[in-house]
Image (cartoon, helix red, strand yellow):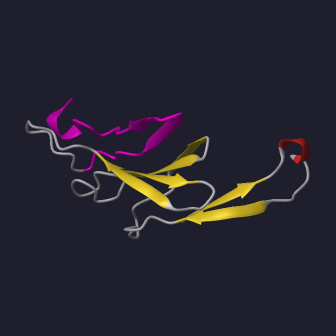
């Protein structure tokens, strides 16, 4: 679970936070590491879960939420490759970034099992 808090920047020294919403993956499981990475742009917030069993065991997932409602809009998983590189243990979602409607996702273990 990720709790979204907001504080006006002009009042950054004041310990006053307001909870906006709680983000929960609809299919979340223990040890998915949901919330390992988080970014937001406009009304969208993305949350990485690099140990989620998206396309394979620990392949990882990224969740897109509406910041105002906390509603999960979609779940992104790594597309299976056509070769012998399974997404197993890739860590898709270890790092995330969003800019407008573009989402950038790190998968640090991609190709690791092939020695790449």
Residue at the spot x=27%, y=44% of the render?
78
Horizontal placement of 8 versus 92: left or right? right
The image shows residue 76 at horizontal and vertical percentages of 35, 49
Count of numbered circles on the image: 0
Residue found at the very far left of the displayed protein: 83
Judge whether residue 106 is colored magenta: yes
Expressed as whole percent of the image width and height from the top left, the position of residue 62 reads 40, 50
Q: Is residue 58 above or below residue 112?
A: below
Residue situated in front as seen by the camera: 2 or 21? 21
* Residue nearer the viewer, 63 or 33: 63
User: Which residue lies at the image location 40% right of the left edge and 46% below the top edge?
Assistant: 93
- Side of 39 relative to 25 (left or right): right
Where is residue 36? Give x, y as percent.
Answer: 50, 52
Residue drawn at x 60%, y 66% is: 22
Q: Is residue 54 magenta?
A: no
The image shows residue 30, relative to residue 115, as above or below, that is below
Viewer-proximal residue among 39 and 106: 39
Q: Give the magenta range.
A: 89-116
What residue is shown at x 35% (from left), y 45% (from top)?
A: 92
Looking at the picture, tell me which residue is in the foreground, 107 or 75. Answer: 75
| Image quadrant containing the C terminus | top left
* Residue 33 against residue 43 in the figure, above or below: below
Query: Where residue 75 appears, x then y in whole percent?
Result: 37, 54
Residue 112, image quadrant:
top left
Q: Is residue 12 left or right of residue 24?
A: right
Q: Quadrant of the N terminus?
A: bottom right
Q: Which of the 4 quarters of the picture holds residue 31?
A: bottom left
């Amino acid at each position: 679970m990720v709790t979204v808090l907001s504080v006006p920047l002009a009042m950054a020294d004041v310990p006053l936070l307001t909870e906006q919403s709680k983000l929960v993956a609809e299919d979340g499981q223990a040890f998915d590491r949901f919330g390992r990475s988080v970014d937001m742009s406009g009304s969208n917030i993305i949350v990485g879960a690099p140990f989620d069993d998206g396309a394979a065991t620990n392949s990882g997932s990224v969740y897109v939420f509406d910041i105002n409602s906390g509603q999960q809009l979609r779940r992104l998983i790594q597309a299976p490759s056509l070769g012998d590189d399974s997404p197993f243990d890739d860590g898709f979602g270890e790092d995330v970034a969003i800019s407008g409607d573009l989402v950038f996702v790190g998968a640090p273990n991609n190709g690791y099992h092939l020695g790449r």
